[in-house]
């Protein structure tokens, strides 16, 4: 029995060895072909006499249609004592219309194969749904009712305010949310973009009249762009849009309140006694979409910290094990953007983590990436762009991005070419121009007793 077992082990080992040799002798997979430009199907546009804009684009083969109304109303429109009033108004808009209860709205949307969503952001509120294509005109009419005739019932306000208080309480326990609040407050003092959280007293004080007034002052046809994506009967959809939205009041033009963000070295420490980790936010204002530098800056960000193969991630995650999932991003709003590196690091290496992050920023300013490193990032970003355009809502999001920032009709179709035209020298130049270490705001949320001495050197202008 022992001899048979030994023989089986030897045979298994021999087969495994042969397999490894065969794998080693396999040829490398063929290189990918040149990146293909994105081609958007011909879109149709329409502007109603009340100012409402419409974009219809045939996209995809699945028999569903996505309709999204993007309203230029959001947290930007809140006063200093109205934080989250836009969010509360968005929640109230889901509570039915003058002719339909909330349950009826939900049931009608479900009968079409979808659900109506209301999402509030810094610059815009999106009211959207994705349903079976045969119900496209009916969906347009339902969305119009939600937008034009919200009931805003006073009976639901106490419940929704309590929900907001719960969300606020939870957010205030999360170190990344705490860091975000401090970071935005530092970059945007006295501007809505810098106000992340309300106080509980603020939420408690909102009345139904506040919600009604906010809706009345910030919703209307002149601030709304309706997007429709899927194969559809264009004539029927035009008629449905005109019939549903043609009588909506024009309302006010979009509010233009472009911030003047602060770009200076400062260190903010928020104490969390006993914290096993420190949360880092490191960043500064940069250029916004529409500037010719924006695409090269996106490439620079992906190389530095905005991808899994980025330099900062490789350094403090792969090589040193300081953190599990660091990342950087260029966060954009209307005529505004900032770059930020975010990481949750072990308390004991808070200072060393800052040192390595700034080291990688400095290195990018002095050492352009190799052609191979840069091409790998370009391939990654090209793939991300393809994914962003692979769904109906994805295409609508891209079209809205172009329209919000005034990027022009050719932006999406030339993006891949512009992306792949970025050179190593441009990356180095972007890092020098937009990422000076002595202008960066640093927010650290962690155990002050254990990290104060580690981060003290970063209070100075240099590093």
Image (cartoon, rainbow, N blue to C red):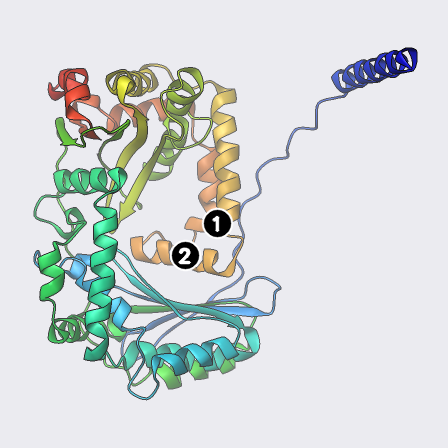
**For residue 423, above or below residue 260:** above
Looking at this view, name the residue that lies furthest to the front.
1
Q: Position of residue 234 (x, y in %)?
A: 51, 76
Task: Determine if residue 347 is in view.
Answer: yes
Q: Residues within 10 Å of mark 2 (few under 14, many from 20)?
A: some
Q: Earlier in the sequence, mark 2 or mark 1?
A: 1
- Residue ID at (40%, 25%): 313
Q: For the residue labelled by badge 1, is the local secondary structure a helix, a strand or a loop?
A: helix
Total label count?
2
> Which image quarter: residue 21?
top right
- Look at mark 2 in the image and give the residue it sits on: 397
Task: Determine if residue 68 is in view.
Answer: no
- Residue ID at (48%, 65%): 43
Quadrant containing the N terminus in the rendered view: top right
> Which image quarter: residue 20?
top right
Tag 2 and tag 1, C-beta contact below 8 Å: yes
- Residue ID at (32%, 80%): 96
- Look at mark 1 in the image and give the residue it sits on: 388
> Which image quarter: residue 268?
top left
Q: Position of residue 181 (x, y in %)?
A: 18, 43
**Separation of residues labelled 2 and 1 (CA atoms):** 8 Å
Q: Position of residue 102 (x, y in %)?
A: 35, 79
**In the image, is 311 to the left or to the right of 183?**
right
Tell me, for residue 132, which label it has, or none.
Answer: none
- Residue ID at (48%, 49%): 388
**For residue 235, above or below residue 204:** below
**In the image, is 384 to the left or to the right of 409?**
right
Q: Position of residue 353 (x, y in %)?
A: 29, 19
Camera-side residue: 346 or 313?
A: 346
């Amino acid at each position: 029995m022992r001899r048979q077992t030994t023989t089986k082990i030897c045979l298994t080992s021999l087969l495994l060895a042969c397999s490894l040799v065969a794998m080693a002798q396999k040829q490398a997979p063929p290189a990918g072909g040149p990146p293909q430009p994105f081609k958007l199907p011909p879109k149709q546009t329409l502007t109603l006499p009340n100012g409402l804009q419409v974009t219809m684009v045939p996209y995809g083969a699945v028999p569903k249609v996505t309709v999204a109304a993007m309203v230029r109303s959001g947290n930007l429109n809140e006063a200093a004592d109205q934080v989250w009033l836009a969010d509360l108004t968005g929640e109230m808009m889901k509570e039915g219309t003058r002719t339909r209860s909330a349950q009826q709205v939900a049931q009608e949307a479900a009968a079409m194969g979808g659900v109506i969503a209301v999402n509030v952001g810094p610059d815009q509120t999106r009211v959207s749904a994705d349903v079976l294509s045969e119900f496209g005109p009916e969906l347009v009419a339902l969305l119009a009712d939600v937008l034009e005739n919200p009931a805003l019932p006073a009976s639901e306000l106490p419940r929704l305010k309590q929900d907001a208080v719960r969300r606020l309480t939870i957010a205030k326990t999360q170190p990344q949310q705490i860091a975000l609040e401090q970071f935005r407050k530092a970059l945007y003092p006295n501007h809505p973009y810098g106000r992340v959280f309300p106080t509980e007293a603020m939420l408690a004080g909102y009345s139904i009249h506040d919600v009604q007034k906010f809706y009345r002052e910030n919703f209307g046809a002149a601030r709304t762009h309706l997007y429709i994506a899927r194969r559809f009967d264009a004539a029927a959809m035009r008629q449905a849009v005109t019939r549903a939205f043609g009588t909506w009041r024009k309302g006010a033009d979009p509010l233009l309140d472009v911030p003047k963000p602060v770009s200076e070295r400062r260190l903010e420490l928020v104490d969390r006694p006993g914290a096993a980790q420190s949360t880092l936010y490191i960043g500064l204002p940069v250029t916004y979409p529409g500037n010719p530098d924006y695409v090269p800056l996106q490439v620079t960000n992906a190389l530095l910290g905005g991808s899994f193969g980025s330099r900062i991630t490789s350094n403090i995650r792969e090589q040193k094990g300081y953190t599990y999932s660091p990342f950087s991003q260029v966060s954009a709003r209307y005529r505004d953007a900032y770059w930020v590196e975010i990481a949750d690091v072990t308390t004991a290496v808070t200072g060393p983590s800052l040192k390595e992050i700034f080291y990688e920023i400095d290195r990018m300013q002095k050492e352009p990436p190799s052609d191979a490193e840069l091409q790998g990032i370009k391939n990654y970003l090209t793939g991300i762009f393809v994914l962003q355009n692979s769904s109906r809502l994805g295409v609508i999001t891209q079209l809205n991005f172009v329209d919000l920032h005034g990027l022009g009709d050719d932006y999406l179709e030339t993006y891949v070419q512009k992306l792949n035209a970025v050179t190593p020298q441009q990356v180095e130049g972007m890092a020098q121009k937009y990422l000076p270490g002595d202008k960066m705001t640093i927010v650290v949320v962690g155990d002050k007793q254990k990290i104060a001495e580690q981060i003290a050197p970063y209070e100075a202008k240099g590093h």
